[in-house]
Image: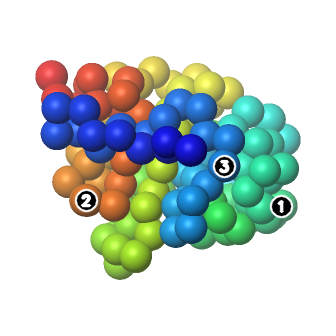
Amino acid sequence: MDNTQIVNGKRVASDRIAELADGEVFVFGSNVQGMHGGGAAWYAHEKFGAEWGVGEGLTGRCYALPTMEGDASLRRAVQNFTDCAAKHKELVFLVTAVGCGIAGYTPAEVAPLFKDASKLENVFLPEVFWDVITK
């Protein structure tokens, strides 16, 4: 199971995560109500124990990031995630392309929000986010 790789100094999360190693956390986009009905949210619920009704924060072997409530909310949620990742250096956070599915954002809109998180050694971002951040 290779969920992470280092490519030209960038910590890249796989876009196909089927299993988690000990200490790995699946970071997915959800809604604030924690109704994990589709996309990566459904997958997180079914595969990695994301709890129904938990729309933000650590849940199961996951971290839920609400992406459906607008730009300001998403910005705050990503900052909360970054703070959590900084506090939990014992965990490895595998960020999916949050917000770029059902929520309808593009990587160009979401990736810059992860600039601070990208500096943390325990945060791995999708390659499409790195493409934007490192331009």
- Number of marks drawn: 3
Q: Earlier in the sequence, mark 2 or mark 3?
A: 3
Classify the position of the N terminus by image quarter. Answer: top right
Residue designated by label 2: 120
Q: Does any portion of residue 56 appear in the rendered image?
A: no
Q: What percent of the width, then of the height, locates residue 33? A: 76, 57
Q: Would you say 13 lies left or right of 67 here?
A: left
Which residue is rendered at x = 36% and y = 28% of the image? Answer: 127
- 98, above or below 46, in the image: above
- Look at mark 1 in the image and give the residue it sits on: 52
Q: CA distance from mark 3 to mark 1?
A: 20 Å
Going by the numbered disc 1, the residue's amino acid type is Trp
Which dot marks residue 19?
3
Whole-angstrom CA distance, mark 2 to mark 1, is 28 Å
Q: Residue shown at 55%/51% (left/top)? A: 27
Where is residue 42 drawn, in percent x and y?
79, 43
Label 3 vs 1, first from the N-terminus: 3
Lower sequence index among marks 2 and 1: 1
Q: Are marks 2 and 3 in contact (CB under 8 Å)?
A: no
